[in-house]
Structure formats: structure tokens, C-alpha cells
Image (spheres, rainbow, N blue to C red):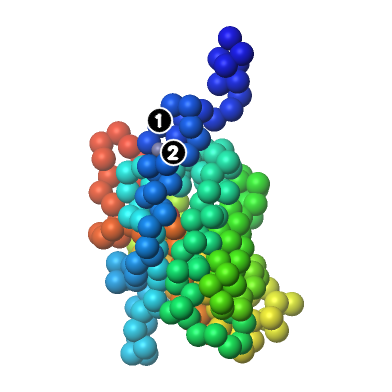
């Protein structure tokens, strides 16, 4: 009886695979617990025309199946209890990626910005927790780094349900470094953090904003990466859910 009552108020189902009596099972944790790999070649919007090539972006998993379900549960279905384990996964990833990043001027670790509307809906920018974890993971890996939520995203920049081209148009000019924070960014190497890399549109506009403030984006870290094509086919009877 007591157990039944507790079951009514606590999450007792794995946010990924749905297994009973555990909030985040060992098997799903392992899906984002492996060696980070590079995924920037899946994100066409990260290409730039100046010949410097796409931004290196590391990730932990394909954004499919149980990983995708878990991220949606975390962002949009009230599973804030996943913040801690997902942040731990990002910290571990950052520690493993650290040797690939240059030591010197401390890195700024900057979360991809969210709109005010989505912060209200979710009780804050959930990606902040991932970025803060990345900063501590980099420090643990011997690379000086600090968390800095310097990017602002205008109203109407929500990407849900838009295709690749619409997302890029929607975001253009809608992300910038907040006025007072421009001096924080000037002259600094920056690592961008987001939960999912899809088309790369969010990282591309974030990078532009950082560069306009005099910073230089050196890498991106994400939890998961959407396999191409960037726009997933819609299944009958299901809404297309996409990520920036
Ligand atoms: Zn699970």
C-alpha cells in the first residue's frame, strides 16, 4: 500500500526505456556513459564559407530510441530528476575531451540559449546545468574553464517543429551576447554546450554571436546527436519533435 502511494508521487519508471521502479536505469545511463565521439559532419548548418571547416563537436549518443525519449522526458515531461545524471555524463565527457583542447587562457563554457518562454515552461534553461558540468569536467581534465551563460535568445526563437531551413531563418539575428557580458567574452576561447545537435543552426548562430563579441568558439559538446537526414521523417500519428 505504502509502495503504491509512493509510486504515485515519485518517478518510478526509467525516463529512457520505461523500466519500472528505477528513474534512470543502468542500461540507459550506459548509453550516454561511453567514449565521446565527433558528430559535426552530421550538422550541415555548422559549415562555414571561410574555409576553416565546421566546428568540432563531441557527443555521447545518437538522439534516437531511449536516449531521445529520455531527453524529451527531461525537457518537456517534468523529469527534472534527470538533470543530475545527465550533467554527470557531460562532466565525464568533458574530462575525456579535455586533452584535445588547448590549455592557456581559461575557456568559457557557454550554454546554448533558450527563449524566455521555454525557461518559464521548464523552470530555467536546463542546458545551464549541462554547461556547468562541462566546466567542472574540463577543470578535472586539467583545462582551466568557467561557466558563463552569456548568450541571450530573443522571443520567437523556439525551434520546435521547424525544418532545417526554417530553423536557420528563425534563429538568424535572434541570439547575441548580453551587453554587459561582451567584455567577458572578448578575447576568450569558448566551448558551446547543448543537449542535442541536429542541424547545427543553434551552434552556428551562437558562434556568430560569440565572434561578434570578440570571442572565438573552439568546440561544442552535446549529449546526443541526431543522425542524418537532419529532418526526421514524420511517423503517422506522431508529431515531429526536433531539437536545436
Ligand atoms: Zn532505462
Q: Which element is circle 2 on?
A: loop
Ligand 1 neighbours mark 1 (CB distance < 8 Å): yes
Give the residue drawn at x 40%, y 71%: 57
Q: Position of residue 187 (x, y in %)?
A: 61, 89
Is there any visible trace of residue 209 in the rendered image?
no
Is there any visible trace of residue 39 in the rendered image?
yes
Ligand 1 image position (quadrant) = top left
Q: Quadrant of the N terminus?
A: top right
Q: Nearer the viewer, residue 15 or 42?
A: 15
Q: Nearer the viewer, residue 1 or 64?
A: 1
Give the residue drawn at x 50%, y 35%: 23
Horizontally, residue 144 falls left or right of residue 221, namely: right
Outermost residue toward the top in this view: 1
Give the residue drawn at x 74%, y 77%: 180
Task: Identify the residue position indicated by label 2 in the image.
Answer: 25
* Mark-to-mark CA distance, 2 and 1: 7 Å
Q: Residue 19's mark?
A: 1
Instruction: Looking at the image, tell me whether mark 2 or mark 1 is earlier in sequence order.
Output: 1
Give the residue drawn at x 25%, y 59%: 229
Q: Position of residue 33 (x, y in %)?
A: 42, 54
Amino acid at each position: 500500500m505504502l509502495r503504491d502511494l509512493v509510486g504515485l508521487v515519485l518517478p518510478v519508471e526509467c525516463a529512457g526505456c520505461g523500466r519500472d521502479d528505477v528513474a534512470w536505469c543502468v542500461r540507459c545511463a550506459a548509453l550516454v556513459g561511453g567514449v565521446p565521439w565527433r558528430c559535426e559532419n552530421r550538422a550541415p548548418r555548422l559549415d562555414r564559407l571561410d574555409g576553416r571547416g565546421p566546428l568540432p563537436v563531441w557527443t555521447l549518443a545518437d538522439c534516437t530510441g531511449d536516449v531521445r525519449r529520455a531527453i524529451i522526458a527531461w525537457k518537456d515531461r517534468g523529469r527534472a530528476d534527470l538533470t543530475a545524471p545527465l550533467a554527470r555524463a557531460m562532466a565525464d565527457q568533458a574530462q575525456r575531451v579535455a586533452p584535445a583542447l588547448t590549455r592557456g587562457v581559461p575557456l568559457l563554457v557557454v550554454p546554448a540559449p533558450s527563449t524566455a518562454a521555454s525557461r518559464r515552461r521548464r523552470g530555467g534553461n536546463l542546458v545551464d546545468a549541462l554547461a556547468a558540468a562541462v566546466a567542472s569536467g574540463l577543470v578535472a581534465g586539467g583545462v582551466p574553464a568557467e561557466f558563463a551563460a552569456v548568450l541571450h535568445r530573443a522571443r520567437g526563437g523556439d525551434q520546435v517543429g521547424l525544418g532545417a531551413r526554417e530553423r536557420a531563418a528563425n534563429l538568424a539575428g535572434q541570439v547575441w551576447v548580453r551587453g554587459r557580458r561582451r567584455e567577458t567574452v572578448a578575447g576568450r576561447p569558448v566551448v558551446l554546450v547543448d543537449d542535442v545537435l541536429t542541424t547545427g543552426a543553434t551552434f552556428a548562430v551562437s558562434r556568430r554571436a560569440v565572434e561578434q563579441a570578440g570571442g572565438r568558439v573552439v568546440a561544442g559538446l552535446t549529449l546526443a546527436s541526431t543522425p542524418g537526414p537532419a529532418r526526421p521523417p514524420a511517423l503517422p500519428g506522431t508529431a515531429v519533435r526536433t531539437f536545436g
